[in-house]
Image (tube, helix red, strand yellow):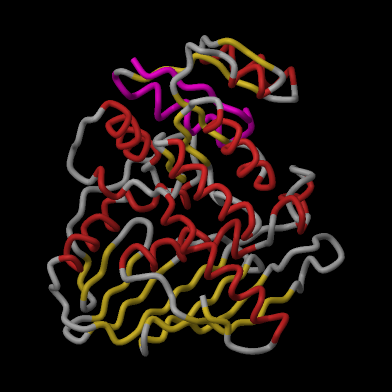
Amino acid sequence: MIRFGIIGCGAISNTHASAIAQLDGAMFGACCDINVTRGQAFAQKNNCRFYDDYHALLADKTLDAVIIATPHYLHATMSLASLAAGKHVLCEKPMATTKEDAAALAIAVEKSKKVYAVCFQNRFNPPFIKLKKMIEQNKFGNLNGVKCELTWHRDQAYYAAADWKGSLVQEGGGVLINQGIHTLDAITWFIAPLDKIKGKIMTSLLEDVIEVEDAAMATGLIGEIPIVIHASNNFSSSPSPTITFDFEKSSIVLSMETLMIDGQVVDIQSITQSAEHKAQWGDSHKRLIEAFCHRLNGQYALNDEYLPGLDARYALAIIWGIYDSNQLNRWVTL
């Protein structure tokens, strides 16, 4: 039995709890939150111990692994502390908000010999897995280009609900590091890390409310292959992000729910919707956590190799590259 502790009992914690409840051989042993009322409610609902200090949770020797589900700026600090305490770590994205923290974390993971994973759960969506295998089999010939589009709706109420969101220091950025990061991870996972990028960011509709960007556009290169990126939180609704692949033999459009090849929808098992998650997240936390548990137990099942680890840095490299390029007004090598 793998006993998890979770640090942070906000909205995303319920998604992790729902996933773990569906897995044999996994359970919550403890939770932690500085909001005592919220943390105790989570503990009661999930039949686990409650701590109001994460250091006390990390000292709990009955716990095998820790899920980090706190605001962005705490991810690296708490991951480092968890590894130092001898715990395996499953961290919500992003793994860090600064280049220095990401580098320190990579070193700590290598030294610790513990399992470290990042919640890029979209890799386990059925359309993503189907396309990944087809690309690995070289079904489509050479790649000519990629287009990424995310247009969601995030208004003032969204930022008012959590005081750390919209803060440059605490969130680390806006639409790129919070919403667009899943799409950028997908590009590096399907194809390769980017070599260079040039981009622009701006804050428009919420310029009087937030310190971070609500819109971004960029062009990246993998070799000579153009990667076009467009992200905005200013749309009227939040449709599924799409990635368009222009291959030599086929045109492919991928969303959270569907895979379309040359205008035809590929028959893939539907994604089961759960009351514990937003539709845009997909429903793949369970498969990701299951793969994480397999890694801890020395087991292997189909698709477990897709578990995100330190390769989560590649999406962050794109984001930081866009931020640097915006400031310097030039191409940035990644």
In percent of width and height, residue 32 lies at: 64, 22
Q: Which image quarter holds the N terminus?
A: top left
- Nearest the viewer among 301 and 213 is 301
Look at the image and say whether residue 43 sits in the magenta stretch.
no
Q: Residue at the location (56% across, 37% down)?
A: 12
Magenta-drawn segment:
1-24
**Number of numbered discs on residues:** 0
Residue sitting farthest toward the right? 208
Q: Is residue 287 left or right of residue 219?
A: left
In percent of width and height, residue 248 lies at: 20, 87
Q: Is residue 240 above or below residue 288?
A: below
Q: Residue at the location (68% across, 24% down)?
A: 33
- Nearest the viewer among 321 and 249 is 321
Q: Is residue 37 left or right of residue 108?
A: right
Q: Is residue 83 left or right of residue 264?
A: right
In percent of width and height, residue 267 lies at: 17, 58
Q: Residue at the location (71% across, 50% down)?
A: 158
In percent of width and height, residue 304 lies at: 25, 43
- Nearest the viewer among 290 and 97 is 97
Q: Residue at the location (34% across, 24% down)?
A: 22
Q: Is residue 248 above or below residue 319?
A: below
